[in-house]
Image: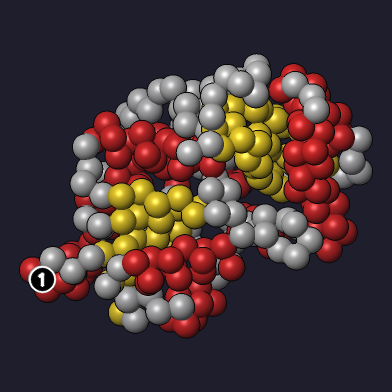
Amino acid sequence: MKIVQTVAQLQETLAPYRETKTSIGLVPTMGALHVGHASLVDRSVKENEVTVVSVFVNPTQFNDSNDLKSYPRTFDADRDLLESHGATILFAPTVKDIYPEPDTRVFDCAPVDSVMEGVMRPGHFNGVCQIVSKLFYAVEPTRAYFGEKDFQQLAVIRRMVKILELPLEVVGCPIVREKSGLAFSSRNARLTEVQRNLAVNISAILRESINFAASNEVGETKKFVEEAIEASEGLRLEYFEIVDGLTMQSVSSWNDTDYIVGCITVYCGEVRLIDNICYRRQA
Ligand code: PAF
């Protein structure tokens, strides 16, 4: 695995692959890699001749400076994990290399960016679009891989790719969960052992809500999840929305659309955790 730190080095490394029209998979990450990231890398390695993984904690997507400061940074372990999963290039740029000058671009990915995380974290998706578009321009991947845990982010990126007419495939990959059901997340590293046991209830409640939804309408199911989270020790609900899986807009009936997902954000102590569950998906 080759480690490159600047966009210029990356271009130089990719040049021979471009000449031979080699397929390139890109896995954008902010490091602190875990089994969930590894599954994206595995998928890319399987589907492409070359896999580029970026490790870059993108400052423009953090609307809370403490969150940026406390974001885990584990470069040596990340490098080892990527090497063992067969990544071809690790791209680990500095902030200066990515943003030699402030990025003033404004992305409008409506309607998918204007609800849920878009409301709770103003500017967050704009920052995500800034970095992901820069990575897409730098790598020119055939395919780019993102986890479905950040379900709304995936929808925003798909929309951005459509608006910018970028010639690549965005591949959404299933959530990877610990045995306990807790979705793998870099933020889990900030949970104490006690909090980790409490956080398990998020996925347990989402799972229970699938059975509840079988004989109850959307509004009742939303209330079921909200009340169960509020009643769970150590958890504080930020939002739970049941939305169309493509537009991210709230639905009011299970018959509204063929793809329905429940998206949740919960604080466990100071740690903000997100998760989601699919209620309905018809081809
Ligand atoms: O999901 C993440 O880790 C980040 O939002 C991403 C897509 C790597 C952009 O910084």
For badge 1, the amino acid type reads Thr
| Residue at (58, 67) in percent of width and height | 34
Quarter of the image that includes the N terminus:
bottom left
Q: Is mark 1 on a helix, strand or loop?
A: loop
> Looking at this rendering, what residue extends furthest in the front direction?
283
Any part of residue 252 in sight: yes
> Looking at this rendering, what residue extends furthest in the top direction?
252
Q: Does the residue labelled 1 lie within 8 Å of ligand 1?
A: no
Q: Which of 113 and 245 is in front in this view?
A: 245
Q: Which of 270 and 151 is in front in this view?
A: 151
| Residue at (75, 21) in percent of width and height | 217
Q: With respect to residue 143, does 92 lie above or below? A: below
| Residue at (61, 59) in percent of width and height | 176
For the residue carrying disc 1, how many other residues have a C-alpha within 10 Å: few (<14), some (14-19), or many (20+)? few
| Residue at (39, 60) in percent of width and height | 27
Relative image position of residue 38 (x, y in whole percent): 51, 69
Q: Which of 35 and 106 is in front in this view?
A: 35
Relative image position of residue 111 (x, y in whole percent): 44, 22
Answer with left or right where residue 227 lies relative to residue 261: right
Residue 97, by quadrant, is bottom left
Relative image position of residue 159 (x, y in whole percent): 36, 34
> Looking at this rendering, what residue extends furthest in the left direction?
19
Answer with left or right where residue 260 lies relative to residue 222: left
Answer with left or right where residue 52 lies relative to residue 178: left
Answer with left or right where residue 147 lies relative to residue 72: left
Any part of residue 91 in sight: no
Residue linked to disc 1: 20
